[in-house]
Amino acid sequence: MKKILLSVLLSAPLWVLGQGFQVNLQGQKQIGMAGAGSALALDEASVFYNPGAVTFLEKNSVSAGVNPLLFKSAFKQAGSDITENVKNKIAPPFEFYAVWGPKSNKWKLGLGVYTPFGGLVDWGDNWSGKYALTSLNLKAIYFQPTLSIKITDRIGIGAGFVYNHGEVNLQRALPVNFPDGHSGHATLEGTGKGYGWNAGLYIKTLSNISFALVHKSKVITKLDGGSAEFDVPNSLRSSFPAGNTFSAELPLPATTSLGVGIPLSQSTVLAFDASWVQWHIYKDLTFDYALNTPVLLDKPSARNYRDGSSFKLGINHQASEKLALRAGVGYAFSPVQDGYVTPEAPDADRYILSAGLGYTPTSHFEVNASFFFEDVKSRKQKNIETGLDGTFKTLVYAPGISLTYKW
Amino acid sequence: MKKYILNSFIAAAILFTAACKPEIETPAGSTAGQANFSKYIAIGNSLTSGYADGGLYLEGQKVAYPNLIGAKMATVGGGAFTSPFFTEEHSNGSGYIALTALVNGTPTLTPVTDKLAYRDAAKHLDKYAGEIQNLGIPGMRLDLSFDPTLTFSAANPFFERLLADAQVGKTNYFQFIQGRNHTFFSLWLGNNDVLGYALNGAVAVTGDPTTTLTDKVTFASLYTNMLNALTANGQKGIVATIPDVTAIPYFNTVTVPALLAAAKAINPAATAVYIQTGTGTVRAATAEDLIRLPFQSAGLFGQGAIPYGLHPLNPIANNWVLDKDEVVKVKDYVNSYNSSIKSLATSKGLAIADTYNYFNQVASTDGINVQGVNLKSLFISGGAFSLDGIHLTPRGNAIIANVFIEAINAKYGATIPTVDITQYRGVKFPN
């Protein structure tokens, strides 16, 4: 009799980390080309896209940009006639770059601060999947100092060290009821850090077709001392101790990209990127609570991701001396296998469409804008662990703008 | 080229401003299929009435599984669904038990005694006179539906309250449910034909027809009569199988190992728990012998000069125990009833909600996960069963409503929407 209670409440996984978390918004020019451009020495965003190309940039520059992102996801429970939508919340992926090097020298230094992973979904506190998740706000901010060196006039290499500052706030309802019937609530919040690197090779052939090979390493982000708050009826407090903390590891995957840049004319260039995202490292997720109880165990939650991939094709057209126009298409294969789709990142294979423009009023200033759209395919799934059963459909809209000063 | 790109950029920007919501289409549309839900009636016992926490009260009545189904049928041509609700003033109906404390996992259960619906000292309940479609009556059995003496209609207060004074003692349930012009029915009856016996520790009390075990052949025959009446005008409907009564928390909370551990904590010399079996034998109990839930608050265990239940000379009495042979017997009856139910329903072309199968999944070690909620057949913590260890919580009702809805949809090609179970609570924990 003493031990019968509550072995259930948290046997469903408390947390899951999905793939839709990879945010492909790191430079307005490349975003306008669907994220292609690792084989083009376009601008200071090469610090992210290909450190090997940075040394081929003609000018020193600093730039800052933002891409307010609207992640519109809908869910319809299996058999239900009700479609539920996430709340309209705007995530702010941003990027800041600086590139400097002595003119006509063989090396350049770069710094990038950008947000390659993140997620913002808020399904509301009373939706039909609330016991799996109510909201997630995840941010990963990478800081990347970089050195890029010309080996020959046509070959550049570059590498950067990556420091990640991660922030997470995850909430879900708990299936325990207060006397008035409302459900309990769990909030996990913490910050973490991780390290990695980013290296690239840039080759410009005699025909001016360029190639890129870039590897961005995995970044195992460790969270320590995160707060685990449980709003539960007082009679259950001993099972959900107040002031609890947790630690966890978030494995952010490595990405290997192969890029090609093909000049079509003096003013038009085509870029193609193929990326292999090594999500297989994401086997499971474990929350290690400082205070364990029979219902609050450090139970691993299986993820079993496979590797994902994406293919992106973009075009950059210099319409006039001052105006550049861009467009792109892409397709990405989801790393989330059947049975593991979650409301945190209701992932599926997706189409990418983008457009962009750049305006250069003076030789020092540049404004670039982009619009990025993703159509994540509808996916009917029953999650193996939570039993959440229904169809997800997601559309992503992200307009963006950046300002650049060059000298 | 230039113009095209510019245009698409503008188009995309407009699209964003509009912020189109993603759409999810339902392929099957909205249809009643081959069924007609314009007047649905629900035949059954306490489970059908919404009885929970050891009583019938308004909150439970509102979330009874037929009421949840009836509300969803409305989207595919169903009519109103009426129930004999207690009034707001008397919303606590027969009274029920609430969880008022939980200390180190030990619950305190307290009767709720305000807003009761008793109209006299003999504990007759407020009458309900209007038209009703939820015809579930707590305590109703298949055999007593055909009560030839007609006395059960007076003896059962939940039945009595639905009858005009002139009818009391002059009708039985089989007569009561007829003539209601239904177009669709659900029938979940027969649980008490075995549960009544089991709840009394497999002791049939002479003169108390609610504690007997209904003969298997009689069961099949009466079930046939019931289905014949309900389908007399070609109506479609759904029947439900009877859950394994030995798997409910009522029989699996006070366990022999737990009792023994409690005894050892006080007296390390304790070696066994002693029970009196159905055959009168006294022996050491095993984990296969099931003790009834109320034993935990009966204040008997270990009491007396010869400690109760801990010595062969003072064993736990037969009526507290479903011993392992009785468990086998009860399971055998459940299986027999269910094979009758399934074969009769199949021969009539009716849908079958296999609640036997479903509750067995709930009773498995890991339980089942439904829409992010884990359900187990555990007392208080399991989420599906209310505080009496027998009847369902609102969450349990919602889940069973979906078992019915899915079976109806599958059988008749209908698209009754399922119930969002996350809107319904489990046990209320004191704050």
Image: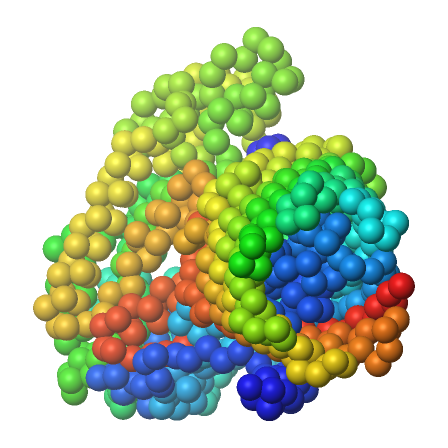
The furthest residue to the front: A206
Residue A105: image location, x then y, percent: 82, 47
Relative to B3, does residue B89 appear above or below in the rendering?
above
Where in the figure is residue A22, as x and y percent of width and height?
Answer: 62, 56
Taking A175 as reference, is B255 left or right?
A: left
- State the image coordinates of residue A152 (x, y, percent, origin top left): 67, 43
Q: Quadrant location of the N terminus of chain B?
A: bottom right
In percent of the image, x 51 and y 41: which residue is there? A280
Vertical arrangement, residue A30 with respect to residue A81, above or below: above
Q: Which residue is drawn at 59% across and 16% down?
A: B264
* Residue A39 percent across, percent down from the top left: 60, 56
Could one spot residue A12 in this view of the protein? no
Residue nearest the observer in this picture, B12 or A340: B12
Indicate whether A131 appears above or below B133.
above
* Residue B364 picture quarter: top left
Nearer-the-camera pick, A42 or A383: A42
* Position of the C terminus of chain B by quadrant: bottom right
At x 16%, y 87%, the residue is B233
Q: Residue at x 51, y 19 (%)?
A: B310
* Observer-nearest of A30 and A162: A30
Instruction: Name the quadrant containing residue A389.
Output: bottom left
